[in-house]
Image: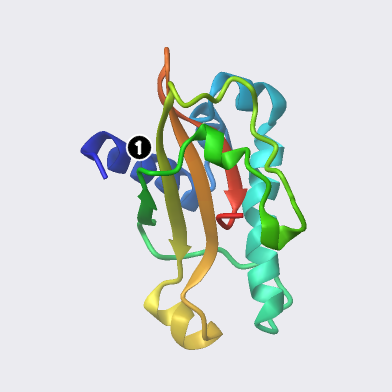
Amino acid sequence: MDDDIRDFGMRIGQRALARDWDGVRALLAPWLRRATSSDDVRRFFEDEYRLTLEANGIGDLRYPEHAEPELGGNQFTNATSLREPISFKNGYVRPVADELTDGNFRYWLKMQLMCSDEQMDEFGFDFFAEVWMAVVATDEGLRVGYWSRGAY
């Protein structure tokens, strides 16, 4: 992963961890930002937190407390491959905007928002959310052109 991609991933992850929903929204590509309010961004993360918590028998909303996101991903995924039907999900096709192209696609970034050590001991899991993002080059700099909870 190139340093600029890593820096971008850290920036968006730290904003999410700080619950700076406006700040996360500012890092979305223009087409995604137009379709997504700051409240939508909050729900995107909090709904995933709730699913993780409920799957582990925890009823009330909690937030990840680890100071930094965990980053990974790959360079071989591109916009074309993101649009291919996913056979093991009954042919599901991701809703990837036309503006996301192989030409502006930079990286398929995985970001995990982790538990603190104390939360791992208390809850019995290690991350609250795994978000996959198509990082794209725009006139504004690197931005998220598409994102999903999990890779699929």
Q: Is residue 138 above or below residue 28?
A: above
Q: Which of 134 and 91 is in front in this view?
A: 91
**What quarter of the picture does the C terminus occupy?**
bottom right
Q: Residue placed at 63% from the left, 42% from the top?
A: 84
What colour scheme governs how the chains and residues are painted in the rendered image of this protein?
Answer: rainbow
Q: Is residue 109 above or below residue 25?
A: below
- The kind of residue tagged 1 is Phe
* Residue 30 in which image quadrant: top right
Classify residue 46 as left or right of residue 134. right
Classify residue 130 as left or right of residue 96. left
* Residue 89 in which image quadrant: bottom right
Residue at numbered disc 1:
8
Q: Nearer the viewer, residue 27 or 2?
A: 2
**What quarter of the picture does the N terminus occupy?**
top left
Judged from this view, the residue extending furthest toward the left is 3
Q: Residue placed at 47% from the left, 49% from the top?
A: 18
Which x, y percent locates residue 53? 65, 74
Q: Nearer the viewer, residue 151 or 23?
A: 151
Q: Residue placed at 35% from the left, 43% from the top?
A: 75
Secondary structure under tag 1 reads helix
Q: Nearer the viewer, residue 58 or 56?
A: 56
* Residue 118 in which image quadrant: bottom left
Judged from this view, the residue extending furthest toward the top is 139
Q: Is residue 62 above or below residue 39?
A: below
Which x, y percent locates residue 81? 54, 40
Q: Is residue 98 above or below residue 84?
A: above
Which x, y percent locates residue 5? 31, 38
Which x, y percent locates residue 131? 53, 53
Q: How many labels does the image show?
A: 1
- At label 1, counting other C-alpha atoms closer than 10 Å, the crowd grade (few under 14, some 14-19, many 20 or more) is some
